[in-house]
Image: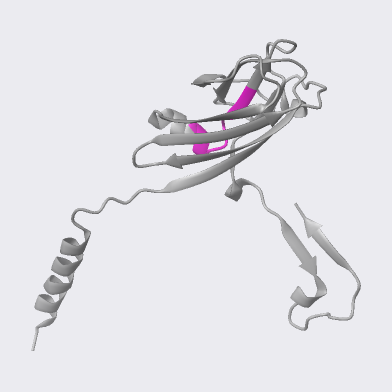
Amino acid sequence: FFSMSKLHQSIVTVFVLCTIGFTFSAEIKFDAVIEGIYQNPPVQTIGTGDATFTYDTDSRKFTWNIAYELLESGVTMAHIHGPSELDENGGHLIDLEVDEGSVSGTIKDSDSITLDQGEYIKNGLAYVNIHTNDHPDGEIRGQILTTSQYFKADITGSQEAPTPVTNTPYEGSAE
């Protein structure tokens, strides 16, 4: 029979042996809705876009896939800006390679970022901004947010507790 201390030592040894050589990292996903109304000050445009981002906290690799369309004039440049809240302007954090002159397209790439840049992004303090000839300060913009920073709930009577209400025609949602 094992004594309790020998059993404890055995468990710890097995745990240590199993975890040697493994690195734990988190891959965080983000997205952004990119529109002129989010510019500061707002821009009236039919231009729009959306973006997805991934940040690997271990390697500090930041990946982006940005799509835009219907811009009023050709793209001149694009950046990730921060730190800034939704209604604030921030400095350039990351320069993005663009197809200059395009009014619709995609911007895909990745880069290693600093710990500070990673913290800004993780805390919702960064945004993507696409600049054009007609709007040199930016035509469309979108805050980079994780899904934990916005929520949606569908509401029905069947979710009522303790007794579900199943005979109601009413439903709702909250965002």
Q: Is residue 125 above or below residue 168?
A: above
* In this picture, residue 11 sits left or right of residue 70: left
The N terminus lies in which quarter of the figure? bottom left
125 in magenta: yes
Q: Nearer the viewer, residue 175 or 129?
A: 129
Image location of residue 78, percent across then percent down: 59, 20
Residue placed at 55% from the left, 24% from the top?
A: 82
Q: Nearer the viewer, residue 97 or 169?
A: 97
State the count of labels. 0
Image location of residue 100, percent across then percent down: 61, 15
Magenta span of residues: 120-129
Residue placed at 74% from the left, 22% from the top?
A: 71
Q: Nearer the viewer, residue 156 or 7?
A: 156
**Residue furthest toward the right?**
169
In terms of image quadrants, where is residue 115? top left
Residue placed at 45% from the left, 40% from the top?
A: 55
Q: Is residue 69 above or below residue 59?
A: above
- Can you see residue 129? yes
Image location of residue 169, percent across then percent down: 91, 72
Q: Nearer the viewer, residue 106 or 55?
A: 106
In terms of image quadrants, where is residue 166? bottom right
Image location of residue 171, percent across then percent down: 85, 66
* In this picture, residue 76 sits left or right of residue 44: left
